């Protein structure tokens, strides 16, 4: 097997919210070109971990490497340069609602390029929208789109700068099973066509096993297990088994302790 | 006693925090306005013009009504008193001076704080709670440069323009009463109105409106960017934004008037 290159590397990441440890020494490597899924129960710190990887939060200790750049020590200008190398697809799509689909998708292009010919930008937008299967939707406003379409527009925006990696925050949350499958297929397609590294945060088990090359299971701010979907399925760990099978009985107590709930990190 | 001190301390600390955040936002906004071009990101004209239309052109009617009727009321009230002294004609200069120096700029600013300040906070606030601000940051688009700067620049230019309109319509209100009701000759009214009105009266008023514009835009943006907690949070931030703007406008009015009063500029 050929040597895999590490795209993103998280080393011993620790983050406190109001004195409570939300991330407790997380270490993981994500390889170039793979689809890496981070799963775990609500409030286990997976969204917080994602926000550290995108540079939106700074850790209390530990490092996050994107390529060879350490996101935790870069200056504002350097962080901006790194941010242009990845895209992010938000849970709520986070499209700017006063701009139409075309303007939303072209926003990063217009902001980061000086005097790009509008014709080229419009062509690039058409191409990206074509990739997510939304050709002809350029002039619609986000409020006119369904949840699944918004997700796909958000995805088109995430890939508009030809990124090396795309982060997905709960890409299938709140979508019906068929649209879920469509979005999953899209993630896989883009992964292959654009040679992307995809990092997906989700707790939708079906999509986990549909798209993942490797899976990390998070529990209470720690990495419980990292492995291929098969390894996770056959895991001996009770917590993992309870989680992937959605069982009520098991080591995870459903009546949560107020101290264990991560209020600040999860929306 | 200790608890009292603790709560006083905590309050002071939170005020210091707010002030710090506000000043840092103002600093960033000015940085992007004056030095943005150094980083290849000068202020873009199109969003500024869009904001100017929204803030300026579409506020003309409401500013007209508020200042016009204030002029009318001012003329009626002062006519009653001045007629006792036999100086009804001075209604003209009283209205024009008090409108230009004080009421025009302040009333226009208060109206705009209600209309535009609230809109700014609600817009940026709902973007904040819907992850849109975070999305901008993730796309390496600075929210201050992208959202705050056009609003600050647009209002800085539009509020003085609206104030001029407010001044004129207030004086027009006084004119209607003076000529229509008090029977003052139209020419005489206008002559008296402008005879005592000096250029200083106008520019003190306009200089105030520049300060008010910064207050409204920056407070609106600050509250919007610091919105937390869904729809309720947006409502709360909007209320705080308008109330803070109102108070700061009156305080700034007092300060600027004081500066002119004591320095005899």
Image: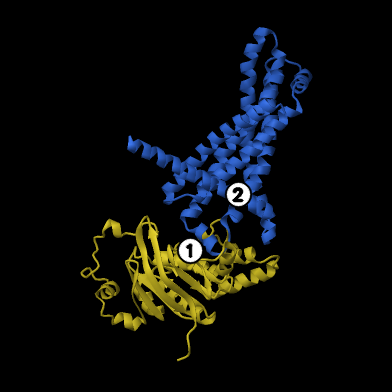
In the current view of this chain or complex, which residue is farthest to the bottom? Answer: A1
Q: Nearer the viewer, residue B246 or B211?
A: B211
Q: Is residue A22 visible?
A: yes
Q: What shade has chain A been given?
A: yellow
Residue at the disc numbered 2: B27
Q: Which picture quadrant has residue A259?
A: bottom left
**Residue A191: % across, % down:** 49, 79
In the current view of this chain or complex, which residue is farthest to the front? Answer: B2
> Quadrant location of the C terminus of chain A?
bottom left
Q: Residue at x 24, y 60 (%)?
A: A255
Q: Which picture quadrant has residue B75?
A: top right
Q: Are marks 1 and 2 on the same chain?
A: no
**Residue B201: % across, % down:** 71, 27
- The answer to whether residue B200 is left or right of residue A130 is right
- The answer to whether residue A45 is left or right of residue A111 is left
Above/below status of B165 relative to B74: below
Q: What shade has chain B been given?
A: blue
Residue at the disc numbered 1: A93
Above/below status of A67 relative to B56: below
Q: Chain of mark 2?
A: B
Say what secondary structure mark 1 lies in. Answer: loop
In the current view of this chain or complex, which residue is farthest to the left? Answer: A249
Calculate the distance from the C-alpha at mark 1 to the C-alpha at mark 2: 31 Å
Q: Which mark is residue A64?
A: none
Q: Residues within 10 Å of mark 1 (few under 14, many from 20)?
A: many
Q: Residues within 10 Å of mark 2 (few under 14, many from 20)?
A: few
Q: Residue at x 57, y 31 (%)?
A: B250
**Residue B106: % across, % down:** 61, 31
Above/below status of B182 relative to B171: above
Q: Nearer the viewer, residue A199 or B107?
A: A199
Q: Chain of mark 1?
A: A
Labelled pair 1, 2 in contact (Cβ < 8 Å): no
């Amino acid at each position: 097997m050929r040597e895999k290159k590490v795209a993103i590397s998280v080393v011993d990441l620790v983050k406190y919210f109001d004195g409570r440890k939300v991330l407790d020494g997380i270490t993981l490597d994500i390889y170039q070109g793979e689809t890496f899924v981070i799963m775990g129960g609500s409030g286990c710190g997976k969204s917080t971990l994602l926000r550290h990887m995108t540079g939106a939060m700074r850790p209390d200790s530990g490092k996050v490497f994107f390529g060879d750049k350490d996101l935790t020590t870069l200056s504002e200008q350097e962080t901006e340069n790194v941010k242009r190398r990845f895209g992010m697809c938000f849970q709520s799509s986070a499209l700017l609602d006063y701009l139409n689909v075309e303007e939303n998708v072209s926003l990063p292009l217009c902001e980061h390029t000086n005097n790009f010919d509008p014709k080229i930008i419009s062509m690039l937008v058409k191409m990206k929208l074509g990739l997510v299967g939304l050709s002809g939707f350029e002039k619609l406003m986000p409020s006119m789109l369904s949840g699944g379409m918004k997700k796909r527009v958000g995805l088109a925006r995430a890939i508009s700068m030809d990124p090396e990696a795309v982060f997905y925050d709960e890409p299938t949350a709140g979508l019906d099973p068929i649209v879920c499958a469509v979005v999953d297929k899209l993630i896989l397609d883009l992964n292959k066509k654009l040679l992307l590294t995809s990092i997906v945060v989700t707790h939708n088990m079906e999509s986990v096993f549909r798209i993942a090359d490797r899976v990390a299971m998070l529990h209470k701010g720690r990495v419980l297990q990292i492995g291929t979907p098969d390894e996770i399925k056959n895991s001996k760990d009770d917590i993992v088994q309870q989680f992937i099978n959605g069982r009520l009985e098991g080591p995870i107590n459903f009546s949560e302790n107020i101290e264990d709930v991560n209020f600040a990190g999860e929306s | 006693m200790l608890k009292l001190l603790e709560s006083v301390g905590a309050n002071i600390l939170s005020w210091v925090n707010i002030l710090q955040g506000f000043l840092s936002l103002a600093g960033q906004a000015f940085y992007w306005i004056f030095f943005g071009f150094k980083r290849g990101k000068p202020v873009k004209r199109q969003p500024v013009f869009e904001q100017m239309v929204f803030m300026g052109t579409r506020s003309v009617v409401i500013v007209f009504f508020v200042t016009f009727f204030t002029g009318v009321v001012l003329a009626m009230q002062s006519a009653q008193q001045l007629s006792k002294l036999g100086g009804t004609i001075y209604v003209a200069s009283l209205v024009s001076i008090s409108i230009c120096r004080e009421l025009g700029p302040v009333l226009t600013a208060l109206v705009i704080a209600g209309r535009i300040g609230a809109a700014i906070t609600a817009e940026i606030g709902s973007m904040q709670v819907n992850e849109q601000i975070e999305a901008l940051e993730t796309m390496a688009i600075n929210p201050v440069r992208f959202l705050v700067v056009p609003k600050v620049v647009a209002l800085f230019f539009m509020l003085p323009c609206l104030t001029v309109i407010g001044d004129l319509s207030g004086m027009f209100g006084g004119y209607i009463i003076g000529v229509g009701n008090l029977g003052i000759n139209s020419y005489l009214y206008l002559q008296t109105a402008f005879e005592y009105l000096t250029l200083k009266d106008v520019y003190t008023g306009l200089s105030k409106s520049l300060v008010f514009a910064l207050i409204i835009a920056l407070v609106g943006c600050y509250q919007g960017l610091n919105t937390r907690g869904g729809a309720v949070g947006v409502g709360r931030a909007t209320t705080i934004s308008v109330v803070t703007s109102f108070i700061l406008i009156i305080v700034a009015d007092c300060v600027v008037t004081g500066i002119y009063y004591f320095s005899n500029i």
